[in-house]
Image (tube, rainbow, N blue to C red):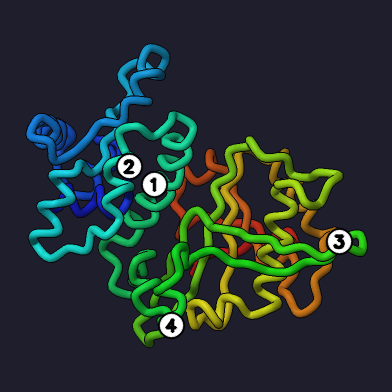
Amino acid sequence: MLILRQLLRYRFLRSTHIAALVGRSLDRTNDRLCRLFHAGYVDRPRAQLDYYPTAGSAPMVYALGVLGAHLLSERGVDCANMDRTRNNREAGRPFIEHQLEIVDFHVALERSMRGRSDLRLIHPEEVIASAPEPTRRMRNPFALRARISQAERAHDVGVVPDLVFGLQFPDGSRRCFMVEIDRGTMPVNRADATQSSFGRKMLGYLHAHAEGRHTNQFGWKTFRVLVVTTDQHRTRLMVETLRRLEVQRSLGPSLFFFASGGELRSSDPLSHIWKDGADRAVRLI
């Protein structure tokens, strides 16, 4: 059941992720996953077979199967999105790879919390459960919408973070974060402001913060956006773009914390020293 619950939470997990999350050896985990797969409780997305010839002995990727979702539902676990479970096997390679990078961050965050009594990780489902009722009824409750004006034109911008979480302290206070995992596939800037770019995404976050969307949707006092990039060059380009964006009543460049994926792989999200958009060294706690 623990493996099925983890797949429900994360959607896609490598066998190495699962072993780390459930606290078992990789051999025992692989044996259990093989049994669950052949029984129909978990799936192996077909797209990963495309890159096994070049990835060598890369860990197998798993997703919750329909039978696994039904079993969880019978045990009282909310598995409302059955369509997503049915579509897991057919998910495309770029989508899966992006999801796995999100999972890399999420699992690293969860592992960094182990053994700590001074801090509690608030998972995305708990953020939604404690949000106002209108937010809980939204099709995508984490989507932030804002109206921005550029070049004398006004248009709506929507941003959907890759991950949302909180860190709660013993006194009940919390810090709230939204995460963007950047794979370098989206231009940082575009001449046409209506086209997708990371600069447009940052502008959307700035306006959403200035308009208090985080307070209306989640009851948060404030938040920060964690941006995990591919390399230092791309980080610098993002920061240069960010410093040109002026949005009244927003936190400006300090709304964003930056780190590269390579840096985080040799550290963890909590102990790592991030850089904010004003080039100041910051930590999450």
Instruction: Tell me residue 112's x, y (percent).
Output: 35, 57
Residue density around tag 2, few if under 14, some if 14–19, many if 20 or more, within 10 Å: many
The mark that comes first in sequence, 3 or 1, is: 1
User: In this view, which residue lies farthest toward the bottom?
Assistant: 171
Cα distance between the residues tagged 1 and 2: 8 Å
Residue that badge 4 annotates: 132
Cα distance between the residues tagged 3 and 2: 38 Å
Residue 110 shown left or right of residue 26 in the figure: right
* Disc marking residue 156: none
The mark that comes first in sequence, 3 or 4, is: 4
Cα distance between the residues tagged 4 and 1: 27 Å
Q: What residue type is labelled 1?
A: Val
Q: Could you tell me if the residues under marks 1 and 2 are in contact, i.e. CB atoms within 8 Å?
A: yes
Q: Quadrant of residue 278?
A: bottom right
Residue 102 shown left or right of residue 77 in the figure: right
Q: What element carries label 3?
A: strand
Instruction: Tell me residue 154's x, y (percent).
Output: 82, 65
Residue that badge 1 annotates: 103
Q: What element carries label 1?
A: helix
Q: What residue type is labelled 3?
A: Gln
* Disc marking residue 150: 3
Q: Could you tell me if the residues under marks 4 and 2 are in contact, i.e. CB atoms within 8 Å?
A: no
* Disc marking residue 12: 2
In this rendering, the answer to whether 174 lies above or below 121 is below
Q: Is mark 4 on a helix, strand or loop?
A: loop
Q: What element carries label 2?
A: strand
Q: What residue type is labelled 2?
A: Phe
Nearer the camera: disc 4 or disc 1: 4
Residue density around tag 3, few if under 14, some if 14–19, many if 20 or more, within 10 Å: few
Cα distance between the residues tagged 3 and 4: 32 Å
Q: Could you tell me if the residues under marks 3 and 1 are in contact, i.e. CB atoms within 8 Å?
A: no
